[in-house]
Image: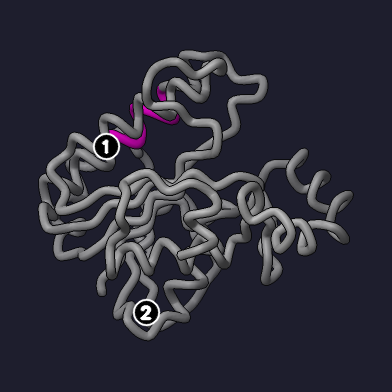
Amino acid sequence: MNVLLFGATGMVGQGVLRECLLDADVTGVLAVVRQPSGRRHPKLRELMHADFYDYSAIESELTGFDACLFCLGVSSAGMPAERYRRITCDLTLAAATTVARLNPAMTFIYVSGMGTDNTGRARTGWGRVKGETENALLRLPFRAAYMFRPGLIVPLDGIKSKTLWYRVFYIATGPVLPWLAKAIPSLVTTTAQVGRAMLAVAKHGAPNPILENSDINRI
C-alpha cells in the first residue's frame, strides 16, 4: 500500500507516520510538509510545499496512492471563526479535491474530532465547521472516505504536541493518561491506536464512514 500523508509533523501525524513505517503492508509514504519532520526511513519521502491551498505545482507527485491519511488540524481556542473555518474546511478540501481527482481509487481518512456534528446542530462553532468538512469530504469521488472522531489522544513513543498548552496538559496528567486510555475507551485513545486503526481501515474498510473514539479503539 502506497500512502499519502498530510500533517506528519503534528502530534497525531507523528503517530500515524510511525505506524505506517512499522507496517509491513505499507510500501511507501509520501509526507507533504511545510518543514522537514526529522524522520529518516527507507519508506519515507518528504515533499516540501508552502501553499496548502494550491497543489497545482506538485500534482505530478500526488498520483499513484492507495490511501490518503489527513491529520492536519488546529485548535479553535482563541482563533477567529473565519480563520478557523479557512484552516479547517478550506485547507482540507483544497487537498482532498486535488487528490480525489488524481487518485479516484483512493481511500481518504480524515482526522476530525469527538463532538463533531454533521447535521448542522452542533452547539459549538468548531463542531459545525468540522461537520461541514466531513460532509464535503464524503461527497468527493473517492473509492471510500472515513471520518475519524477521536476524543482525548494520549501521545506515546516520545511524541509531543507542538501546542504549548497541550504539552503542559500532557505533562500534568501524564501519570494517569495511560490508565484512562484503558479505562475509558469511549473517550480516550492513543497516537498508536489512531495510526493502526487508520491503516486497518485503509486496507479493509469499515462498516460506517463515521468512526467515533470507541470504534477507533475497537478497530
For disc 2, the marked residue is 43
Residue at the image point whose x is 51% and y is 63% from the top: 218
Cα separation, mark 1 vs mark 2, equals 28 Å
Local SS, label 2: loop
Residue at the image point whose x is 60% and y is 20% from the top: 79
Residue 15 screen position, x and y as percent? 55, 64
Q: Earlier in the sequence, mark 1 or mark 2?
A: 2
Residue at the image point whose x is 12% and y is 43% from the top: 141
Q: Tell me the kind of residue under disc 1.
A: Leu
Residue 48 screen position, x and y as percent? 37, 54
Q: Quadrant of the rendered structure where residue 60 is?
A: bottom left
Query: Does 34 sit left or right of 154 as displayed?
Result: left
Whether pointer 1 and pointer 2 mark residues with C-beta atoms closer than 8 Å, the reply is no
Q: Is residue 62 above or below residue 66?
A: above
Residue interval drawn in magenta:
86-93
For disc 1, the marked residue is 137
Question: In front: 206, or 101?
Answer: 206
Residue 116 screen position, x and y as percent? 48, 31
Mark 1 neighbour density, 10 Å: few (under 14) some (14–19) many (20 or more): many
